Amino acid sequence: MGEFFFSYGLFLAKLLTVFLLLVALLVLATAFGGRGRRSKGTLNVTHINEQLDQSREMLQSMVLDPADFKQSAKLKKKQDKQEAKAKKASAKIAAKNRGDGTTIVDEKKRRRIFLLDFKGDIKPSQVDYLRKEVTAVLSIADVYDEVAIKIESGGGTVHGYGLAAAQLQRIRDKNISLVVSVDKVAASGGYLMACVANKILAAPFAIIGSIGVMAQIPNIHRLLKKHDIDVELLTAGEYKRTLTVLGENTDKGREKFLEDIQVIHDQFKNTISRFRPQTDMVQVATGEVWSGEEAIRLQLVDEIITSDEYIVKSCESADVYSVKYEEKKPLHEKFGAAAALTADRVVDVLLQKADRSRFL
């Protein structure tokens, strides 16, 4: 039985090899064919209220008596008409206000919430999408509205997350309410973004904090010296290069590097103090992380609630729109991702077969 699974695994390995070769050729062909072309992105907008209504109606149709479901549908239709009428009236008032150049807060106007979603990596690579989303929202949002953004990030490059935080500050500069929701983690650069908000929401076990700066540089100078390999580094400017990977590092260079890190840390703390003056920076700017429930005690967040609960509650009094910029992936990237996924699955199958053969 073990020989059978071995032969079967060998056959799958050959088949996988042929498949990957074909995919590689196709990827190369599409990559060279699409060189110089930029894929166009699209802004996708979803009305969350309608999504919730559709889900509720589908569930009601399955669990309610037909007569009860029909009655419920009638009541919902009547309610929708009343809301549509109220929207139309408030739109006329808003148009009139814009016409005479004044801003009059209309208490009857139904609030709009624009929901963004940011999942950050080390770079962070999603900043350009965030920029486009914020620009689109600010083109129509006014003081009645709110921007809510779900952030999930453990931090990354200083310049990348500094730019991401600056994009969110554009919303505050327009006097539009900004709410940040953290379900999993907003640490370091992720919290730098979050602190810009008027209000920070967090799940009970979300990871919050890591208000610090870290830099790690390997140095192989001694290894090169052991093998009689010299490295020459020429600079113009005393501190053009402080620490290096190949050259010999000095105490003076280390001191300057630490000084630069401290400057960034001070800027980080000053940003948090500006947006959250109630937070004790001496207590929280240690690089530590806390759960959501601990973070509220330290005034790093304002409320313990998940993003899902906040969105559902908001739909009761506001129109919630999910705004997401998506860029179409080139054909060679799609094939590459599909090939990688297929390879992972085949390897998993082979490993499972190998494990079984040990016990048969």
Image (cartoon, helix red, strand yellow):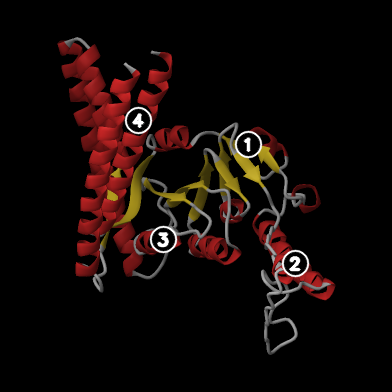
Mark 4 or 1, which is nearer the eye? Answer: 4
First reached walking from the N terminus: tag 3 or tag 4:
3
Mark 3 or 1, which is nearer the eye? Answer: 1
The three-letter code of the residue at mark 3 reads Val
Q: Report crowding for label 3: few under 14, some 14 to 19, many 20 or more residues within 10 A (C-alpha).
A: many
Classify mark 4: helix, strand or loop. Answer: helix
- The residue to which callout 1 is attached is 292
Quadrant housing residue 357: top left
Q: Is residue 143 left or right of residue 237?
A: left
Q: Residue at x 33, y 58 (%)?
A: 94
Q: CA distance from mark 3 to mark 4?
A: 46 Å
- The residue to which callout 2 is attached is 222
Judged from this view, the residue extending furthest toward the front is: 3
The three-letter code of the residue at mark 1 reads Gly
User: Is 100 or 258 nearer to us in this picture?
Assistant: 258
The three-letter code of the residue at mark 4 reads Leu
Q: Residue at x 21, y 15 (%)?
A: 62
Q: CA distance from mark 4 to mark 1?
A: 42 Å
First reached walking from the N terminus: tag 3 or tag 2:
3
Mark 1 or 2, which is nearer the eye? Answer: 2
- The residue to which callout 4 is attached is 350
The three-letter code of the residue at mark 2 reads Arg
Q: Report crowding for label 1: few under 14, some 14 to 19, many 20 or more residues within 10 A (C-alpha).
A: many
Classify mark 1: helix, strand or loop. Answer: helix
